[in-house]
Amino acid sequence: MQRLVLASNNTGKLREFTALLAPLGFDIVTQGDLGIPEAEEPYATFVENALTKARHASRLSGMAALADDSGICVDALDGAPGVYSARYAQTVGKPKSDAANNAHLISQLAGKLNRHAHYYCVLVMVRHPDDPRPIIAEGVWAGEVVDAPRGNGGFGYDPHFLLPQLGRTAAELSADEKNTISHRALALQGLVARLQTFGAKGCI
């Protein structure tokens, strides 16, 4: 199998990436398992941050690397938390955690009627640190933010992310369901399609 370093230490993401890429013959290892520190994410766009993380992991591992940058964008907050989704609570001086991030999001939406939001994910795969043609794919998952958390699955903002057409939050979906329709799943499906078009081994 082809080893691929994931430029993330998020166990939820690792589960999702492993489930979708294993059939293509990829053995995914996290950068943390290799002792690689997290890269800085200084940019205002998801794609720039993902590319930076992928190049960083590839440079320090000597391996092909996959990185994503993803988050929730809320209409009433002009797209926030956006690229700051994973550290939203830290923007107001609170410790980084899913619970703190969710609490801050709900507080920011107090009194607002528009609850439309979407999860966004961009994936970047590089063959080597200076790869001039990174493979890029994106996915968008539309929904609404609800005040009361529901469900015990998923991670991040999933308990507050309602899918109106299903009547459930992302945290109420099974792993198999989420891996079919989520923003990350859609981005991964796009990535897999590109790898299959060019031949997975030829791309890496």
Image (spheres, rainbow, N blue to C red):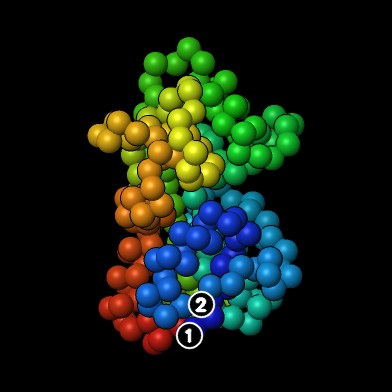
**Closest to the observer, 24 or 138:** 24
Residue 190 placement, left or right of 58? left
Which mark is drawn over residue 27? 2
Three-letter code, disc 1 = Met
**Closest to the observer, 149 or 53:** 149
Q: Is residue 193 visible?
A: yes
Q: Is residue 130 visible?
A: no
Q: From what the image shows, is residue 184 above or below residue 124?
A: above
Q: Say which quarter of the image contains residue 146.
A: top left
Q: Say which quarter of the image contains residue 58.
A: bottom right
Q: From what the image shows, is residue 30 above or below residue 112?
A: below
Image coordinates of residue 59 in percent, x first then y, are: 65, 76
**Closest to the observer, 94 or 76:** 94
Tell me the residue that label 1 is attached to. Answer: 1
Residue 64 placement, left or right of 191? right
N-terminal of the pair, mark 2 or mark 1, is: 1
Give the spatial CA distance, label 2 vs label 1. Answer: 6 Å
Residue at (51, 34) in percent of width and height: 80
Residue at (59, 51) in percent of width and height: 43
Which mark is drawn over residue 28? none
Label 1: state its secondary structure. Answer: loop
Query: How many residues crowd around disc 1 within 10 Å: few (fewer than 14), some, or many (20 or more)?
Result: few
Discs 2, 1 touching: Cβ within 8 Å: yes
**Closest to the observer, 160 or 49:** 160
Image coordinates of residue 166 in percent, x first then y, are: 27, 36
Residue found farthest to the top? 111
